Image (cartoon, rainbow, N blue to C red):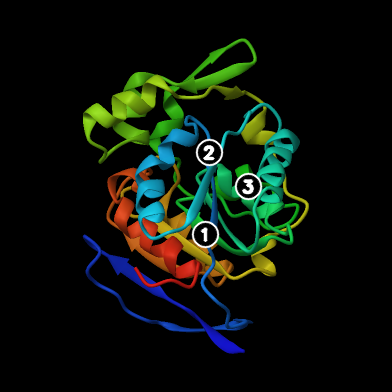
Amino acid sequence: MMNRRTFSTVVAAGLTTSALGLGSRTVASAAPIQNVVLVHGLYADGSCWTEVIRLLQAKGLKATAVQNPLRTFDGDVATARYTLGLQDGPTVLVAHSFGGMIVTEAGIHPNVSSLVYIAARAPDAGENYPALAKQYPTPPASAGLVISGDLEQLNQNAFMNDFANGVDPARARELYAVQAPNAVSLPATAKTTVAAWRSKPSWYAVSKQDRTINPDLERFMAKRMKATTIEIDAGHLSLISHANEVANLILAAAGQHS
């Protein structure tokens, strides 16, 4: 067994790293993990992982992006579990944004060896996440929600300037075009029954310029879970604007060198 470190790292163009302390959990030494399952959040679909997938594949990993229905929390969790069941061995389970709710619930699956949160929600078991978020200043993206019937999504202005800030505008427009609407009730009613990060080694990437989830809330969740943590000078979509840093964090969770 080897002690697992808890880092707080400031990444500016992926250059600066500092270790701040030791975590109490341990993980077994093992061969590098070959499977990665990637879970997207609201206002997105699986294509948001394209840049990261390309980098992971170049390192010989099998990467699979889940396509969440975004209608009910149970349905999203079931979809993630289905994908995890298709993996042929230990798997790094990765979440972005609302996907952190799904990963926190589904991450107890026996195939999951470690968890990676990218600017993601990381609730405790049974926690009221909206109430937790209200303890921090409201980020601007939420003001751009457009509701039609039982579904909602971000308007173009909020998507481009608050959700995809820092992303190349042409790429941001592509992402806006494939934005998946979600059930209006989903963000407020989703609630985990377990917290996989309490039993699985966890990594977290904070987005310092996030306008969708408050960066201080991200820092609180990362510290609470004793995650190996980096900070990226990026908006909410660091997985696109800073794909190398995100891929390197996933590789670390898989036991591989970047």
Q: Residues within 10 Å of mark 2 (few under 14, many from 20)?
A: many
Q: Which residue is mark 3?
A: 101
* Front-lying residue, 137 or 67: 67
Which of disc 2 and disc 1 is earlier in sequence?
A: 2
Residue 79, compared with residue 135, is above or below; it is above
**Residue 243 percent across, percent down from the top left:** 32, 51
**Residue 95 percent across, percent down from the top left:** 53, 49
Residue 247, compared with residue 166, is above or below; it is below
Residue 41, labelled with which disc?
Answer: 2
Q: Which residue is mark 1?
A: 116
Answer with left or right where residue 198 lies relative to residue 137.
right
The residues tagged by marks 3 and 1 sit, at their Cα atoms, a distance apart of 12 Å
The residues tagged by marks 3 and 2 sit, at their Cα atoms, a distance apart of 9 Å
* Front-lying residue, 134 or 77: 77
| Residue drawn at point x = 71 percent, y = 42 percent | 82
SS under mark 3: helix
Q: Is residue 210 visible?
A: no
- Image quadrant in which you'd find residue 71: top right
Which of disc 2 and disc 3 is earlier in sequence?
A: 2
Residue 2, compared with residue 181, is above or below; it is below
Q: Which quadrant, please, contains the N terminus?
A: bottom right
| Residue drawn at point x = 36 percent, y = 47 percent | 54
Q: Amino acid at mark 2?
A: Gly
| Residue drawn at point x = 56 percent, y = 67 percent | 202
Q: Amino acid at mark 3?
A: Met
